[in-house]
Image (cartoon, rainbow, N blue to C red):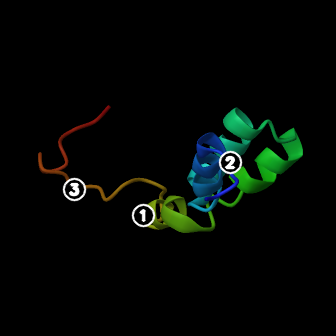
């Protein structure tokens, strides 16, 4: 039997995941220092699915203009 309790196993699992999940786990569930949280949050733009999402921006920092299902007509 594992000596880690179920909530701790869940937290450990979250910490093994993507930086976008890790920093929030550190902040909201672990109570890590602000410095630790900010260091982990800084990884979101460089690693994992946050980095993959940001890489899809065009040079202007927008999101694939003209590729939407409405022919690019949507404008917030």
Residue 7 lies in what quarter of the image? Answer: top right
> What residue lies at 65% left-to-right and 45% top-to-bottom?
5
Q: Are marks 1 and 2 in contact (CB under 8 Å)?
A: no
Image location (x, y in percent) of residue 30: 75, 40
- Residue in the picture at 47% in, 58% down: 60
| Dot 3 or dot 2, earlier in sequence | 2
Looking at this view, is 6 or 38 the one in front?
6
The label number, if any, that marks residue 58 in the structure image: 1
Along the horizontal axis of the image, is 44 left or right of 76? right
Q: Residues within 10 Å of mark 3 (few under 14, many from 20)?
A: few
Q: Which mark is residue 8?
A: none
Is 33 on the left or on the right of 5, as rendered?
Answer: right
Between 69 and 12, the one nearer to me in the picture:
12
Where is residue 65, by image quadrant? bottom left
Could you say where residue 74 lies in the image, as x and y percent from the top left? 21, 38
CA gap between label 1 and label 3 equals 12 Å
The residue identified by callout 2 is: 23
Q: Which of the numbered marks, if any, corresponds to residue 66?
A: 3
The outermost residue toward the left is 70
At mark 3, the secondary structure is loop
Give whichever of discs 1 and 3 has the lower sequence position: 1
Picture coordinates of residue 76 (x, y %)? 32, 31
Q: Earlier in the sequence, mark 1 or mark 2?
A: 2
Asked which secondary structure carries label 1, the reply is loop
Q: Secondary structure at mark 2?
A: helix
Answer whether labels 1 and 3 touch (C-beta < 8 Å): no
């Amino acid at each position: 039997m594992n000596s880690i309790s179920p909530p701790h196993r869940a937290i450990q699992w979250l910490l093994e995941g993507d930086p976008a999940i890790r920093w929030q786990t550190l902040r909201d569930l672990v109570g890590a220092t602000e410095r630790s949280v900010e260091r982990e949050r800084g990884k979101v733009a460089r690693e994992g699915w946050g980095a993959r999402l940001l890489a899809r921006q065009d040079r202007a920092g927008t999101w694939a203009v003209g590729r939407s299902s409405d022919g690019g007509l949507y404008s917030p």
